[in-house]
Amino acid sequence: MQNSKELTKIESQLKAFEKENPSFANYRYFDCDGDPTRCDVFLVGINPSKGLANGKIFWEYWNAQSGFNHEDWLEDYKSENKKNKKREQSPTRRRIEALRDLLKENEHKLLNCNVFSKNTKRATELSHDDKNLEVFRILTKEIKPKWIIVHGDLPKKVIEKVTNYSTNTRKWEFLELDFGSFKSKVMFIPHLFNVALTTEKNKNRNVPLIWDKMESEIKDM
């Protein structure tokens, strides 16, 4: 049974944010397979590199009873890339989907989001006003993920600021950080673009290593 009450709460908060910030209304706030409240793992980047396909808005993929329609969204994403004569999935997206599948195999659910919601080709193109953390705060506060994987140095700096934590933390190591209303196990890793899909290609920097680190933490808990 879906958590429709919780989904409606997330929806109402995001729409209230949109009302106050209309320029954010056509951004991709997050993607997941179905109910976001059942996602115990967040994958967090700095901001999306592109918007939604074919001029659609986030709510065309959303249902307050079932959550986010990942299948339709991914199909539209691939279709638009083909139309623009690009590879079906970017290297980063391929790794996101590989991680989603791997976690699903191990009975965990992934929500992919960013600290900032506005899409730009490069993060350096974000203006001061674009660096709005409200969507990220809504998602983390309402869902309270047990695990957060932060990929890239830019979102790492933001998360450290949000949690008032500053250290020369090594990558690929989990630590518990306090987000105010909840605590989560957080691991900083390189940007997924620079992470290999298989252990054969790079055993020390690969998608399966994320699950290996999680599994090791779970066993020690």
Image (cartoon, helix red, strand yellow):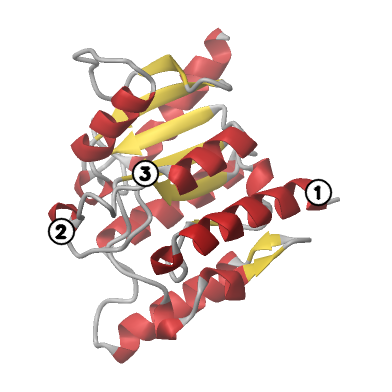
Q: CA distance from mark 2 to mark 1?
A: 37 Å
Q: Residue at x 28, y 38 (%)?
A: 155
Q: Residue at x 53, y 69 (%)?
A: 58
Which residue has dot 1 on it? 5
Amino acid carrying label 1: it is Lys
| In the rendered image, the vertical position of residue 151 relative to residue 177, given as above or below | below
Q: Residues within 10 Å of mark 3 (few under 14, many from 20)?
A: many
Helix, strand or loop at label 2? It is: helix
Amino acid carrying label 3: it is Val
Q: Residue at x 42, y 64 (%)?
A: 24
How many discs appear?
Answer: 3
Which residue has dot 3 on it? 115
| In the rendered image, the vertical position of residue 59 relative to residue 47, given as above or below | below
Which residue has dot 2 on it? 125
Question: Of label 3 and label 1, which has the lower sequence position?
Answer: 1
Quadrant housing the C terminus = top right
Q: CA distance from mark 3 to mark 2?
A: 15 Å
Amino acid carrying label 2: it is Glu
